[in-house]
Amino acid sequence: MSEKVKVAIVGVGNCASSLIQGIYYYQNKKEEEITGLMHYDIGGYKPWDIEVVAAFDIDARKVGKDLSKAIFEKPNCTTVFYPDVPKMDVEVQMGPLMDGFAEHMLDYPEDQRFVPADKEPVDVAKVLKESGAEVVVNYLPVGSEEATRYYAQCALEAGCAFVNCIPVFIASDEEWAKKFKEKGLPIVGDDIKSQVGATITHRALANLMSDRGVPIDRTYQLNFGGNTDFLNMLERKRLKTKKVSKTEAVRSLIPHPMDNDNIHIGPSDYVPWLKDNKIAYIRLEGRLFGDVPMFIELKLSVEDSPNSAGSAIDAIRCAKVGLDRGIGGPLYSISSYTMKHPPIQYPDWKAKELVDKFIKGEIER
């Protein structure tokens, strides 16, 4: 067991910015002052024990800069809650472009979109090995199917665990899960489920109605925001796995079949002035005693990237614990707790219980 969790970040966007700010934010807090964490200690690792040793991006404003500066460059627009991130001596390396850039972004102002750098990509597997990275965190844009598989393969070659925060199915794909298991490397995925986001809130409401004997007839979840994630997702063909991921996260808690026409969950639109604020409208319609109709409507407003980091900081540390214990393949408990499309979809209360048992070493994965 090393004292640090050495991490490589793929995609230096808003989520990476919030995660890195959080590492230093909590380092400068007394234990009794700490709030906002799902787990303070995981296997002996505190939030500030995460050390970022490598980073990859394709944006000209980030590549070549120290990571401490790159996280505050455009188009990043998330809340700056810890502006004093010290120099990290980690240069952002040029990654392969592949399908990580959606062409429709060229129609938008540069401060709202990615600006691909005119540089040759580095040998990612080589950089991972030389940096000593133990856990690779994938923060690529939604729809980056080819690029995600490339980085997952690089993680395998470099002997790194993989935390897949986007809706490309790696941990929940049998072939990829087998590859990581055979290499003795943990994987956590897929598609980060924020600390208190639209998915976990929708699941809680669906579970409430089901537990109270109210069949759900129709439901929707509409999301919009002003960060590059929402701009990227305006290209609908990039959303196939995202829609599957978000829909199944809710559908899995509804005990009766639902026609696809009666369940709609997915991104809705891009509103630039919202920046990293995400708005979600959730509605569930059902029938009470005597088949009398009822509905729940809810509006959720959250800063998207800190919300994501609140889950990622647990997923990363659990991946490291898996490495320490020599576990290969998907970590089912933390995947279900922090991801929308895990290999096994547990109810949230059960996932939390299993994560606590995993941390204590009472279950293997």
Image (spheres, rainbow, N blue to C red):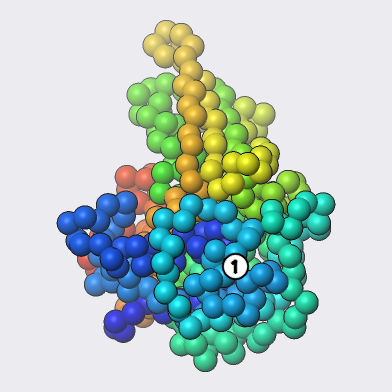
Residue 104 in picture, x, y percent from top left = 80, 53
The image shows residue 247, relative to residue 191, as above or below, that is above
Identify which amino acid the numbered label 1 is placed on.
Gly
Q: Residue at x 73, y 46 (%)?
A: 234
The quadrant of the rendering that contains the N terminus is bottom left
Residue 217 in picture, x, y percent from top left = 54, 22
Can residue 3 be seen from the camera position used here? Answer: yes
Q: Residue at x 27, y 52 (%)?
A: 35
The image shows residue 288, relative to residue 150, as above or below, that is above
Where residue 354 sits, quadrant-wise, is bottom left
Q: Residue at x 44, y 32 (%)?
A: 206
Q: Residue at x 75, y 83 (%)?
A: 120
Tag 1: Cα neighbours inside 10 Å, few (<14), some, or many (≥20)?
A: many
Task: Give the total number of marks visible in the rendering.
Answer: 1
Q: Residue furthest left?
A: 32
The quadrant of the rendering that contains the C terminus is bottom left
The image shows residue 11, relative to residue 353, as above or below, that is below
Which residue position holds label 1? 11
Q: Nearer the viewer, residue 285 or 365?
A: 285
Left or right placement of residue 139 versus residue 318 in this view: right
Can residue 332 be seen from the camera position used here? Answer: no
Where residue 87 sits, quadrant-wise, is bottom left
Where residue 74 sits, quadrant-wise, is bottom right
Left or right placement of residue 143 versus residue 191 in this view: right
Residue 167 in picture, x, y percent from top left = 60, 56
Residue 347 in picture, x, y percent from top left = 38, 44
Circle 1 — which element? Answer: loop
Q: Nearer the viewer, residue 349 or 178?
A: 349
Left or right placement of residue 209 versus residue 364 in this view: right
Left or right placement of residue 361 versus residue 21 in this view: left
Q: Nearer the viewer, residue 78 or 169?
A: 78
